[in-house]
Image: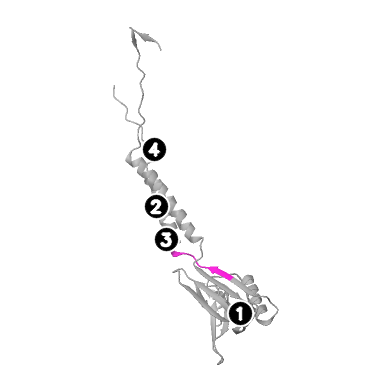
Amino acid sequence: MHHYGGRPARASFRTPRLPSCATGGSWAWLVISLAVIVWGIRFLSQPTDLRHLKCPRDREDLCELIVLTEDEDRVVHTFPGKDLLRAEAIRVRRGRAVNPKNMRRKQVRKLGYSFQLVVRLDDDGREARHVMSYGSVGRSDSKSRVSEIQEYVTNIDVSGLDVYESSGVSAVGILLVIYGAFSLIFCLILGQFSEPPPPRKRR
């Protein structure tokens, strides 16, 4: 290192500047907004309403219908396989089974397709109906499910029955995605993601 007058020149080191509270807070806001959106998407990817029907080959043995709702209420219905009378194709709208008989053609077109089980309750002819999906499963899937269950009901050579349906969208997931999206938009508009240049010194 060159020096003049017998004294070595001192090397100058700049200490790195830490980000200001505004910049650090903006980046933290951005990360939290993205995390909320991802969390909401995870909720949306999981169905909130589950139906699982399992029936054995022997019609004297019990079928098991497991119902799991968004509130995590687990209900199990059991009945002999011989009491499963039939499956019926139904129409659904906004999470409800509806009767399209008295509806106009335009209204009927807006309805979704689903199916339900008809189970004998007693020897007096009383029946119970269990909707397998309150969301639309599509016309073709509804028909194929009804055919599958009818095959079990009418053909004793069928080895068993295993039907699983899931539907529903989490309200919590929707709120998280909306909240995270608005938070992200405001973060991008109002946030500071780089330090402003230092003011010039007047000579």
Task: Identify the secondary structure beneath mark 1.
Answer: strand
Relative to residue 12, is residue 46 drawn left or right? right
Query: What residue sits right under mark 4 in the picture?
Result: 194
Amino acid found under the numbered disc labelled 1: Ala
Q: Earlier in the sequence, mark 4 or mark 3?
A: 3
Amino acid found under the numbered disc labelled 4: Ser
Rendered image: mark on residue 183 = 2
Q: Nearer the viewer, mark 1 or mark 2?
A: 1
Q: Distance of mark 3 from mark 2, alpha carbons?
A: 12 Å
Query: What residue sits right under mark 3 in the picture?
Result: 175
Residue in the image at 58% along x and 78% along y: 63
Q: Nearer the viewer, mark 4 or mark 1?
A: 1
4 and 2 marks in contact (CB < 8 Å) = no
Q: Quadrant of the N terminus?
A: top left
Q: Earlier in the sequence, mark 4 or mark 1?
A: 1
Disc 1 packing (10 Å; few <14; some 14–19; many ≥20): many
Task: Identify the secondary structure beneath mark 4.
Answer: loop
Amino acid found under the numbered disc labelled 2: Ser
Q: Is residue 38 above or below residue 172?
A: above
Query: What residue sits right under mark 1 in the picture?
Result: 87
Relative to residue 127, is residue 4 drawn left or right? left
